[in-house]
Image (cartoon, grey):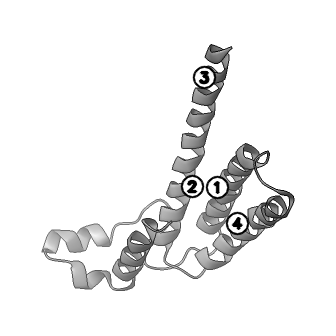
Amino acid sequence: MLIQMPIIFGIFALLRNPLAYLQSYEMLFAVHESFLWMVDLSQPDKWILPILAGIATFISFRMTSQQQSAAQPGGMGSMMKMMQYFFPVMIVLMGRSFPAGLTIYWFVGQFIQIFFNLHLNKVRKKIKEGGK
C-alpha cells in the first residue's frame, strides 16, 4: 500500500488538471477520445466502475482472508471479517466521487491481485502435493 500511494496521488493530480500535462496538439485529441462508456476519465463514474472496483476488492479480501484465517487469533479474525465488508463499500462510495481514471486503477489493481492469488494457490497446492 505504501508503494501505491504516490501512484494514486499522481493519477489523482493528473486527472484533476490534465491540460497542464499536454505538450503537443496530438495529445489533445487523445485526451478527448472516449474510453468504453466514459467520455472523460477526469469525471467520476457514478455506478459501474465503483461497483466493479468494490466487487473486485471484496473478492480479493475474501481470498486473502481464507488464506490467513487459520493463522489469525480470534480478535484479528473478526477485524479482518469486518474490513472484508467495510472496504468494498468504502471503495464504492469514494469511487463515486473520485475521477474515473483512479477508480479504473483500483479495479485493475484488485483484478491483478485476484489472479495473483489464484496462481499462488495453485503453486502452494503443487508444493503440498509434491511434499507428501
Which residue position holds label 3? 127
Dot in front, 3 or 1: 3
Q: Are marks 1 and 2 in contact (CB under 8 Å)?
A: yes
Q: Amino acid at mark 4?
A: Pro
Q: Secondary structure at mark 2?
A: helix
Q: Residues within 10 Å of mark 3 (few under 14, many from 20)?
A: few
Q: Disc 3 to disc 1, how far (Cα)?
A: 27 Å
Question: If you read the primary sequence from the N terminus, does the residue marked by circle 1 or circle 2 appear first?
Answer: 1
Question: If you read the primary sequence from the N terminus, does the residue marked by circle 2 or circle 3 appear first?
Answer: 2
Question: In x, y percent, where is residue 105?
Answer: 47, 63
Dot in front, 4 or 3: 3
Q: Secondary structure at mark 1?
A: helix
Q: Amino acid at mark 3?
A: Ile
Q: Are marks 3 and 1 in contact (CB under 8 Å)?
A: no
| Residue drawn at point x = 71 percent, y = 43 percent | 67
Which residue position holds label 1? 56
| Residue drawn at point x = 14 percent, y = 74 percent | 25
Q: Residues within 10 Å of mark 1 (few under 14, many from 20)?
A: many
Dot in front, 2 or 3: 3
Residue extending farthest left = 24
| Residue drawn at point x = 64 percent, y = 71 percent | 91
Q: Are marks 2 and 3 in contact (CB under 8 Å)?
A: no
With 105 as the anchor, is 64 left or right in this view? right
Which residue position holds label 4? 88
Q: Amino acid at mark 1?
A: Ala
With 51 as the anchor, is 77 left or right in this view? right
The answer to which image quadrant residue 9 occupies is: bottom left
Which residue position holds label 2? 110
The answer to which image quadrant residue 87 occupies is: bottom right
Q: Secondary structure at mark 3?
A: helix
